[in-house]
Image: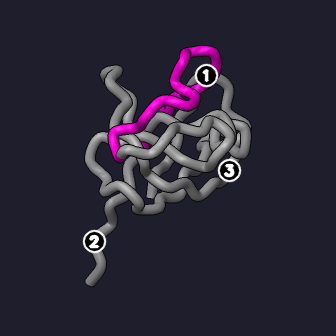
Amino acid sequence: MTRDRGETCIASQYGVGDGYHGRRTASGERFNTYALTAAHRTRRFGSHVKVTNMANGRLVAVRINDRGPFVRGRCIDLSRAAANAIGMGGTARVRVD
């Protein structure tokens, strides 16, 4: 039997005018806002998750390479490229699988 590890929550976007582009992530690699990556508090570095925007059904697969978000109520921070792929502005309600 497989266990469903999905979660529904608020996603945010980072790497746009906030100084994170080019800095080291918690995994040690340089953050690239144009790559399909994300920050999550507990998922393993290098793991891949699917993020679905609940408002429009658009989906993107991202690789976890950083820790965060550090704002209560949010479960994932998406790079600019990932946020754009699902048609997300600053924040959006998403499903993470």
Q: Earlier in the sequence, mark 3 or mark 1?
A: 3
Q: Which is more toward the observer, 3 or 70?
A: 70
Q: Nearer the viewer, mark 3 or mark 1?
A: 1
- What is the CA distance from the residue labelled 2 to the residue labelled 1? 31 Å
Q: In x, y percent, where is residue 61?
A: 58, 58
State yes or no: discs 2 and 1 in contact (Cβ < 8 Å): no
The residue to which callout 2 is attached is 3
Tell me the quarter of the image containing the N terminus. bottom left
State the image coordinates of residue 89 (x, y, percent, origin top left). 67, 25
Q: Position of residue 31 (x, y in %)?
A: 52, 37
Q: Nearer the viewer, residue 23 or 73?
A: 23
| Secondary structure type for disc 2 | loop
Q: Residue at x 35, y 55 (%)?
A: 45
Say which residue appears at 53% left-offset and 35% top-offset. 93
- Residue under label 1: 90
- Give yes or no for contact between labels 3 and 2 (Cβ–Cβ under 8 Å): no
Residue 3 visible in the displayed image: yes
- The span from disc 3 to disc 2 (Cα, nearest Å) is 23 Å
CA gap, disc 3 and disc 1: 17 Å
Front position among marks 2 and 1:
1
The amino acid beneath tag 3 is Gly
**Drawn side of residue 56 relative to residue 43, left or right:** right
- Measured from the top left, where is residue 3 in percent x and y? 28, 71
- Of the 4 image quadrants, the one containing the C terminus is bottom left
Residue 88: image quadrant is top right
For label 3, the residue is 57
Tell me where the magenta segment starts and ends, as one range. 8-27
